[in-house]
Image (cartoon, helix red, strand yellow):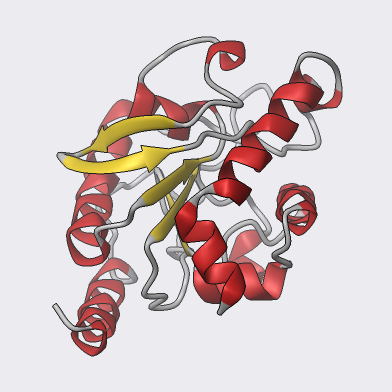
Amino acid sequence: MPPTNQVAALEEHLTALNKCKMCPLMIGPVVGPGPVNSSIYLIGQAPGPHEEKFGKPFAWTAGKTLFRWFGRIGMDEEEFRSKVYMAAVCRCFPGKSKSGGDRVPLPQEIVNCSNWMKAELEILKPKLVIPVGRLAIEQVLGKAPLVDLIGTRFSGSLYGHKCDVIPLPHPSGASTWFKKEPGITLLAKALDEINNHPEWQKFKSI
């Protein structure tokens, strides 16, 4: 599929996605990227309570940390958003949990939203997938301790699509995992793996 057709397919896909109201407990609107035709595909967990105001993923505190990480390997926020497709396990804010944090999406909500991800993978056929945080990582690599996953490049499969996978911890301000060892060292290794990947190097040179 030529790039122009991919962009048209993404625009049609996003038009349908933005109308989705499949999950009654989710709080809309849908938060997602523009039609970025990219071979790098980032997966977050779900938008937080502030992303709606900005209409883009990772637009609040966690995003500032995430983009500082990518800045360390040569791509600032503006450039990253223009070159990388930013998806999520769920595209609407799940609401708050009884404990006060963001509610973890229900299994059925994850299944419902997975159809949008499958469609994106079919259109984009990304070569590098970057899942951010436990929930996103589990969709690609299954459940395992972060110390066994962060800092490693995997050959994986996401809904039948083969790709390289380099997971990152969640950049939430409430998390301390990446602020102390072994998280500090493993995060640095993960960023090095991303920086050395051919797709990242290709986009940095554009």
200 or 182: nearer the viewer: 200
| Quarter where residue 179 is shown | top right
Q: From the top left corner, tell me how far across and down residue 101 is, in percent.
A: 67, 31
Is 13 displayed left or right of 101 in the figure? left
Q: Residue at x 20, y 79 (%)?
A: 9
Quadrant placement of the N terminus? bottom left
Image height of 179 relative to 49, above or below: above
Q: Residue at x 19, y 85 (%)?
A: 5
135 or 28: nearer the viewer: 135
Residue found at the far right of this picture:
180
Quadrant placement of the C terminus? bottom right
Is residue 92 visible from the viewing direction of this image?
Answer: no
Q: From the top left corner, tell me how far across and down residue 73 is, in percent.
A: 72, 54
Is residue 77 visible from the viewing direction of this image?
Answer: yes
| Quarter where residue 2 is shown | bottom left
Q: From the top left corner, tell me how far across and down residue 123 is, in percent.
A: 20, 66
Image height of 139 relative to 35, above or below: above
Q: Residue at x 68, y 31 (%)?
A: 189
Image height of 199 relative to 56, above or below: above
38 or 103: nearer the viewer: 38
* Number of numbered discs visible in the structure rendering: 0
Q: Residue at x 36, y 19 (%)?
A: 142
